[in-house]
């Protein structure tokens, strides 16, 4: 079976997914939609697809699944529309910036029985998956502490910050999902500190560019996250998991993994410059996993519920910064007994 795709959004992340889809022999990119006609035409032309409107893709009989790469404030509405249209849905994170809106969206997904995967691509990175496998194989014993370092090479424009939802919902949300992925337990409390150290314009837009977060589970396991919008040395992506019998780590990756030794000392090539090159394999494996779910009609992972929990953790972190205290995740989601949506597809 070949899964036929419609791509909504021809921007930076849309281009990444177009490459992943067209590189998969089980996928075919049928159509591209974007509010900017020139962007849609360029991307469609590059991969031999058609330019269609969102409405045409929604009604199309020759499209099985859609990839939503449009601005965040359109995600939930589009998920609902395509769930009702009977399409499988892959949506970039976050589903929305409001927890209650995400819950309402996931109820529609549940009612329609739609397949929904949320784009936490780092779960599919070969290096991070190898860390997860080492844990599963018992090589480090019981997980006790997780450390995640995630730093961008440079700050985004202030205009982007205003629409992104802020550092916790836009950037740290990937690390919240990775912390859950590696801890193997749900997070109970969130403590966060955040500052503006990189660009005053980000602070003027109401956001932060430097953040540290501590997460704790009910059993006492910890995860620490370090974020910055400025890493002058490249795209800094590292994880370490400490366990009762040892530790496992995934270090930074480089386009070329060599080391030169001479009279000046030891040198290595620079890191990847950003996510488009660092996570190329992750995006390809992510789309492959989504295709498998569509073909087998099995639940997708990361699911809509995973997206909801990551957003709740982001909200808890922001509240922690504003109020200067540790915040229980249940303050954001409601009592555990009321969180049936977390059992989502």
Image (tube, helix red, strand yellow):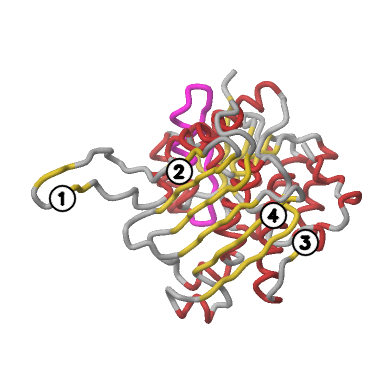
The residue carrying mark 3 is 328
Please count the marks in the image: 4
Q: Tell me the CA gap for discs 1 and 4.
A: 41 Å
Q: Tell me the CA gap for discs 1 and 2.
A: 37 Å
Above or below, comparing residue 73 to residue 67 in the picture: below
* Percent of width and height locating residue 1: 59, 18
Is label 2 in a helix, a strand or a loop?
helix
Q: Is residue 129 visible?
A: yes
Sequence-earlier tag: 1 or 3? 1
Task: Give 233 or 44, whichever is nearer the viewer.
Answer: 233
Q: Tell me the CA gap for discs 2 and 4.
A: 34 Å
The residue carrying mark 4 is 216
Sequence-earlier tag: 1 or 2? 2
Q: Give me the disc on residue 16.
A: 2
* Percent of width and height locating residue 334: 85, 58
Task: Give 48 or 294, whichever is nearer the viewer.
Answer: 294
Q: Which residues are magenta?
A: 17-36
Above or below, comparing residue 4 to residue 106 in the picture: above
User: For the residues carrying marks 1 and 2, which lies nearer the camera in this image?
Assistant: 1
Sequence-earlier tag: 2 or 3? 2
Q: Give me the disc on residue 23.
A: none
Sequence-earlier tag: 2 or 4? 2
Sequence-earlier tag: 1 or 4? 4
């Amino acid at each position: 079976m070949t899964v036929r795709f419609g791509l909504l959004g021809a921007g930076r992340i849309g281009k990444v997914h177009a490459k992943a889809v067209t590189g998969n022999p089980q996928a075919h990119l049928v159509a591209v939609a974007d509010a900017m006609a020139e962007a849609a035409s360029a991307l469609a032309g590059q991969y031999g697809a058609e330019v269609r409107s969102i409405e045409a893709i929604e009604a199309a009989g020759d499209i099985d699944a859609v990839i939503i790469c449009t601005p965040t404030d359109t995600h939930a509405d589009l998920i609902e529309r395509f769930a009702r249209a009977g399409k499988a849905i892959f949506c970039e994170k976050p589903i929305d910036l409001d927890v209650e809106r995400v819950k309402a969206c996931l109820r529609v997904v549940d009612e329609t029985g739609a397949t929904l995967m949320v784009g936490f691509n780092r779960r599919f990175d070969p290096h991070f998956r190898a860390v997860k496998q080492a844990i599963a194989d018992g090589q480090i014993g019981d997980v006790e502490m997780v450390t995640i370092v995630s730093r961008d090479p440079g700050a985004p424009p202030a205009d982007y910050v205003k629409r992104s939802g802020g550092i916790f919902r836009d950037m740290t949300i990937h690390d919240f999902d990775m912390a859950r992925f590696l801890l193997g337990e749900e997070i109970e409390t969130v403590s966060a500190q955040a500052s503006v150290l990189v660009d005053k314009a980000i602070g003027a837009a109401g956001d932060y560019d430097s953040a540290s977060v501590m997460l704790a589970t009910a059993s006492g396991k910890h995860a620490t996250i370090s974020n910055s919008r400025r890493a002058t040395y490249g795209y800094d992506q590292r994880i370490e998991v400490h366990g009762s019998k040892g530790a496992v780590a995934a270090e930074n990756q480089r386009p070329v993994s060599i080391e030169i030794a001479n009279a000046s000392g030891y040198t290595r090539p620079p890191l990847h410059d950003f996510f488009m090159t660092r996570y190329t394999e992750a995006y390809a494996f992510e789309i492959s996993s989504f295709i498998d779910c569509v073909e087998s009609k099995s639940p997708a992972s990361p699911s809509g519920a995973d997206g909801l929990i990551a957003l709740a953790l982001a909200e808890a972190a922001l509240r922690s910064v504003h109020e200067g205290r540790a915040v229980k995740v249940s303050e954001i989601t409601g009592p555990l007994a009321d969180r049936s949506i977390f059992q989502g597809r």
